[in-house]
Amino acid sequence: MDTPEGLHELEYARHILEEVLGWPAKGNLELVGDCIRAISISRKLTLIQAHAYLKRAINLAKEQQIPVDKFFFQDGKYTDVRPVSVTSSGIPWYRFETPEEKAALEAHKQTPEYKAAQQELERAWAKLAGRTAMS
């Protein structure tokens, strides 16, 4: 199911609870909504990007057999979930789970903040490339 843009954080939370986790919204809605808001603020993402981030963290946690319970959200464990770097078959660790994640990433790459950070990174790499071990 594609998630529409422009929803309130609680509507994104309801989607995660009902469609991704299969949990009842009552009693969990504000907790997951707060997580989406926290991701949005701390990582400077839109709400739909924060929704995609949390959804991906949940899917990665499930793949890695990390318990996804209320403490996963309450203790902020969703921020600690990292993809496995490379599988044993040599397949790259990152793959887009859904078209909305790919679209959110592409939209993020068009932001002035991303472009400025990319330019800063390229300048740093260029500076490092000019150095030698003897410098």
Image (cartoon, helix red, strand yellow):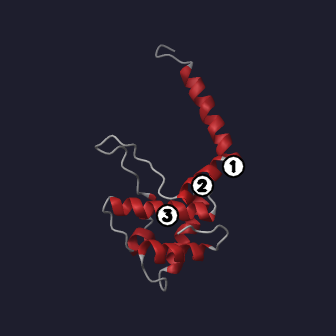
**In this rendering, would 3 be left or right of 18?**
right
User: Can the viewer see residue 39?
Assistant: no
Q: Mark 1 falls on what kind of element?
A: loop
In the picture, the disc for residue 54 is: 3
Location of residue 41 by image quarter: bottom right
Location of residue 104 by image quarter: bottom right
* Residue ID for mark 1: 111
**First along the sequence among labels 2 and 3:** 3
The picture places residue 30, in percent across and down from the top left corner, at: 53, 79
Q: Amino acid at mark 2?
A: Ala
* Residue ID for mark 2: 103
Residue positioned most to the bottom: 26
Residue positioned most to the left: 88
Q: Mark 2–mark 1 contact, CB under 8 Å?
A: no
Q: Mark 3–mark 1 contact, CB under 8 Å?
A: no
Q: Residue at x 67, y 69 (%)?
A: 6
The picture places residue 39, in percent across and down from the top left corner, at: 55, 62
Q: Mark 3 falls on what kind of element?
A: helix
**First along the sequence among labels 2 and 1:** 2
Q: Amino acid at mark 3?
A: Leu
Q: Residue at x 57, y 72 (%)?
A: 12
Mark 2 is surrounded, within 10 Å at the Cα level, by few (under 14), some (14 to 19) or many (20 or more) other residues, namely few
**First along the sequence among labels 3 and 1:** 3
The picture places residue 74, in percent across and down from the top left corner, at: 44, 72
Q: Amino acid at mark 1?
A: Thr
